[in-house]
Structure formats: structure tokens, C-alpha cells
């Protein structure tokens, strides 16, 4: 990632060389705001799976949605 991207996450510990671990960043931010949150993740790669939008794959302006549900 470039320096312009890093400015969006100035206190993050999830930069790994030229890569950024977005999943780990999101989990940390959610846990910081909602202490007892249960988080479920999946191993779907949005770049490889064409059922999902991916800016890296085809520069789409479309975005994927996430669902947060109080239980």
C-alpha cells in the first residue's frame, strides 16, 4: 500500500511490508467499540470470486456489504 493509504490508519499495527491486513484491522476496531462482540469471518477471496465486487480485479465502483446484527 502507498503512503496516502496509510494516512487512513495512522495507529494501525496491521501493515505488513507493502500489504495491509484489512480483516485484522476491522476486527480490532469492532472489538474496541463493542467489547463483547462475536465476530464471524469467512475465507472468501473477493478478488478471485466473481460473485463479489473487487476494485483490485476490475476497478469497479461497486462495493460489498457487511451485516452487523445485534443478537
Image (cartoon, rainbow, N blue to C red):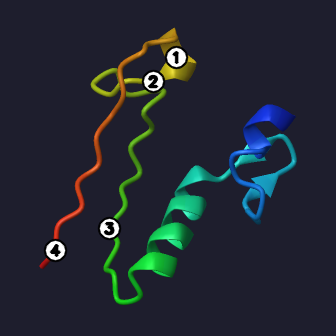
The C terminus - image quarter: bottom left
| Residue beneath the point at 44% across and 13% down | 60
Asked if marks 2 and 3 touch (Cβ < 8 Å), the reply is no
Marking on residue 70: 4
Marking on residue 7: none
Query: Where is residue 39 shown, x and y percent of the image?
Result: 35, 72
| Residue beneath the point at 32% across and 28% down | 52
Q: Secondary structure at mark 1?
A: helix
Which marked residue is nearer to the observer: mark 4 or mark 1? 4
Is the residue marked by circle 3 packed among few (<14), some (14-19), or many (20+) residues within 10 Å? few
Mark 2 or 3, nearer chain start: 3
Q: Secondary structure at mark 2?
A: loop
The N terminus - image quarter: top right
Total of numbered circles in the picture? 4
Marking on residue 54: 2
15 or 32, nearer to the observer:
32
Query: Where is residue 8 shown, x and y percent of the image?
Result: 69, 46
| Residue beneath the point at 76% across and 64% down | 11
Asked if marks 1 and 2 touch (Cβ < 8 Å), the reply is yes
Residue located beneath label 1 in the image: 57
Q: How many angstroms separate mark 1 from mark 2 (CA)?
A: 5 Å
Which marked residue is nearer to the observer: mark 3 or mark 4? 4
Mark 3 or 4, nearer chain start: 3
Asked if marks 3 and 1 touch (Cβ < 8 Å), the reply is no
Q: How many angstroms separate mark 4 from mark 1 (CA)?
A: 33 Å
Mark 4 or 1, nearer chain start: 1
Q: Secondary structure at mark 4?
A: loop
Q: How many angstroms separate mark 4 from mark 2 (CA)?
A: 28 Å
Q: Considering only vertical position in the picture, is 50 above or below 25? A: above
Marking on residue 40: 3
Amino acid at each position: 500500500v502507498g503512503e496516502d493509504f496509510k494516512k487512513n490508519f495512522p495507529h494501525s499495527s496491521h501493515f505488513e511490508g507493502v500489504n495491509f491486513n484489512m480483516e485484522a484491522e476491522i476486527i480490532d476496531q469492532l472489538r474496541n467499540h463493542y467489547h463483547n462482540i462475536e465476530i464471524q469471518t469467512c475465507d472468501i477471496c473477493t478478488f478471485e470470486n466473481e460473485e463479489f465486487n473487487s476494485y483490485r480485479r476490475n476497478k469497479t465502483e461497486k462495493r460489498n456489504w457487511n451485516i452487523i446484527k445485534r443478537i
